Image: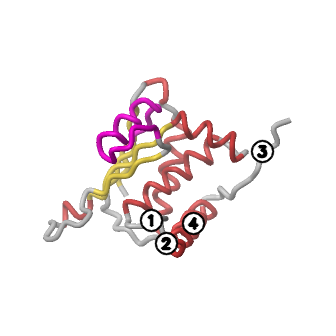
Amino acid sequence: MDITISYDKETFKNKELEDLIHLVLNKGAELQQVSENAEISVLICDATLIQELNCQYRHIDAPTDVLSFALNEGMAGVTLEEENMLGDIVINIDRAIEQAKEYRHSKEREMAYLAVHGFLHILGYDHYELEEKKAMRQAEEAILSACGLQRIIINEN
């Protein structure tokens, strides 16, 4: 899968984080049987930008942890080239750091989780109904576990 990672601010750039996002998204594509020709983009940003996007696209004037934009959602008659363009994931690094502390695991594990969560939303998974939520959580954990990223709690001492 072709994965493009960009940053809202140059200070967010991190090669290890990029490698991790590539790992989990490629494993997700493999497990979800997504075409090798698929394309996805990831933007790492701060709380301010994601709040602007959340307000603009979801009419919720608050920051969130991750946004997903499926490019072909509900589109009939798309070409093969268009079909391969899955969409965009926007990850709030500020919220990822907060949530990593809250859930007592690493920032890297949280960023990997948010990338996978956004990816699965693009593929059509959701978590509003109990059964949907179970299916999405199972798919998330299958991908993360396959990458060796089981939930490991970090001691704060």
Count of labels in the image: 4
Residue under label 2? 132
The front one of 30 and 140 is 140
Depth check, front residue: 141 or 68: 68
C-alpha span from label 2 to label 1 = 6 Å
21 on left or right of 98? left
Instruction: State the image coordinates of residue 112 (x, y, percent, origin top left).
Output: 55, 50
**Mark closest to the chain's N terminus, 2 or 1:** 1
Q: Identity of the amino acid at label 4?
A: Arg
What element does badge 4 sit on?
A: helix
Is the C-beta separation of discs 2 and 1 under 8 Å? yes
90 horizontally vs 131: left or right:
left
Residue 117 inside the magenta-drawn segment: no
Residue 115 in the image: x percent, y percent? 48, 51
Cα separation between marks 1 and 3: 28 Å
Judge the density around disc 3: few (<14), some (14-19), many (≥20) Cα neighbours within 10 Å.
Answer: few
Label 1, label 4: how far apart the Cα atoms are: 10 Å
Disc 3 from disc 2: Cα separation:
29 Å
- Which residue lies at the image location 34% right of the left edge and 49% below the top edge? 88
Mark 3 and mark 2 in contact? Answer it, CB < 8 Å.
no
Q: Which mark is residue 126?
A: 1
Circle nearer the viewer, 1 or 3? 1
Look at mark 3 in the image and give the residue it sits on.
154
Question: Does 106 sit left or right of 16 as displayed?
Answer: right
Which element type, helix, strand or loop, lies under badge 2? helix
Q: Is residue 10 above or below residue 126?
A: above
Residue interval drawn in magenta: 43-63
